[in-house]
């Protein structure tokens, strides 16, 4: 049966199946961890930002000194640069390994959405010097090994939130960025104005923060 292909950055990537082989030799000869020292910026969601701030001890304000921000069609983005090297890379490896974003867990694979469905792919632009010829594990095993389940669930909740916010057509102005950094991205803002609601787990805090932002963002932007 012909495999589905998805167009990414000008070239076609084949959608992977769960039993497809993933051959990687992370950390051994031939691999120079170029995934942390090369490639496009990693777009971060607020769940990943909260994990990174917690693991690194950085406040959100300090994190803004090491990431880049942009606004695309009115939607603010927070991105982690990897060129010439990710801020969290050390000679001993990733200094926030347990809190690394989903893109790092998947690399050199990627996850893309096409017609409302998600697919795993190996985009050409993800340069990995440690790809091995011999299949060593399946995609399903690789996702499990990289502990991606919670990150994927939270990434899906984030996509739902982004889709809802895009339908609101917020103004493409600096005030929109200010509102998003304050209410959506910053883990230093309480997840709810009701201090009795302060969940312990990062997942519950993220979900509560999104619920609060759904109500507060339109109010904030209408009144500004
Ligand atoms: S967060 Fe860690 S794994 Fe991801 S690019 Fe940076 S150093 Fe590499
Ligand atoms: S993903 Fe590729 S470049 Fe990155 S550590 Fe693994 S083998 Fe090396």
Image (cartoon, grey):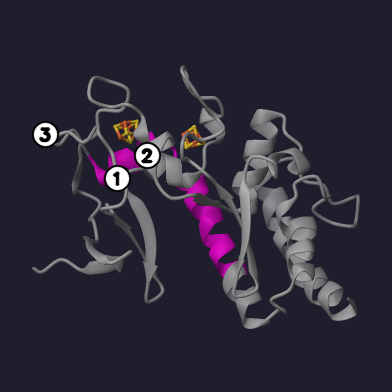
Of helix, strand and loop, which one carries label 1? helix
Residue at label 2? 144
| Tags 1 and 2 touching, CB below 8 Å | yes
Using a 10 Å C-alpha cutoff, classify the residue at mark 1 as few (fewer than 14 neighbours), some (14 to 19) or many (20 or more).
some
Residue at label 1? 140
Residue 188 position in % (x across, y down)? 80, 45
| Count of residue discs | 3
**What residue lies at 49% left-to-right and 49% top-to-bottom?**
42
Q: Which numbered disc, 3 or 1, marks the residue closer to the eye?
A: 3
Residue 101, visible in the rendered structure: yes
Of helix, strand and loop, which one carries label 2? helix
Label 3 to label 2, Cα distance in Å?
A: 19 Å
Residue 169 position in % (x across, y down)? 67, 82
Left or right of 133? Residue 4 is right
Residue at label 3? 134
| Tags 3 and 2 touching, CB below 8 Å | no
The prevailing secondary structure element of the residues shown in magenta is helix
* Region in magenta: 138-161
Left or right of 128? Residue 74 is right
Whether residue 55 is situated above or below residue 177 in the rendered picture: above
Of helix, strand and loop, which one carries label 3? loop
Q: Which image quadrant shows ligand 2?
A: top left
Asked whether mark 1 and ligand 2 are closer than 8 Å, the reply comes as: no
Nearest to N terminus: mark 3 or mark 1:
3
Residue 148, visible in the rendered structure: no
Nearest to N terminus: mark 3 or mark 2:
3
Furthest residue to the front? 84
């Amino acid at each position: 049966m012909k495999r589905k292909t998805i167009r990414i950055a000008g070239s076609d990537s084949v959608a992977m199946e769960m039993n497809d082989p993933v051959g990687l030799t992370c950390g051994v000869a031939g691999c120079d961890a170029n995934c942390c020292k090369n490639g496009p910026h990693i777009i971060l969601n607020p769940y990943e930002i909260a994990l990174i701030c917690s693991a690194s001890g950085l406040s959100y304000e300090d994190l803004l000194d090491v990431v880049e921000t942009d606004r695309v069609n009115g939607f603010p983005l927070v991105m982690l640069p990897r060129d010439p090297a990710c801020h969290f890379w050390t000679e001993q490896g990733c200094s926030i390994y347990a809190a690394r974003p989903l893109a790092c867990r998947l690399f050199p694979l990627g996850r893309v959405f096409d017609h409302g469905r998600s697919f795993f792919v190996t985009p050409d632009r993800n340069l990995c010097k440690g790809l091995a010829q011999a299949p060593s594990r399946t995609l399903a095993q690789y996702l499990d090994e990289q502990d991606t389940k919670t990150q994927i669930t939270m990434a899906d909740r984030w996509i739902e939130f982004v889709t809802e916010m895009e339908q609101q057509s917020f103004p493409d102005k600096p005030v929109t960025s200010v509102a998003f950094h304050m209410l959506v991205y910053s883990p230093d803002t309480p997840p709810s104005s009701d201090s009795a609601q302060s969940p312990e787990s990062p997942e519950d805090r993220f979900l509560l923060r999104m619920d609060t932002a759904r109500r507060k963002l339109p109010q904030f932007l209408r009144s500004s």
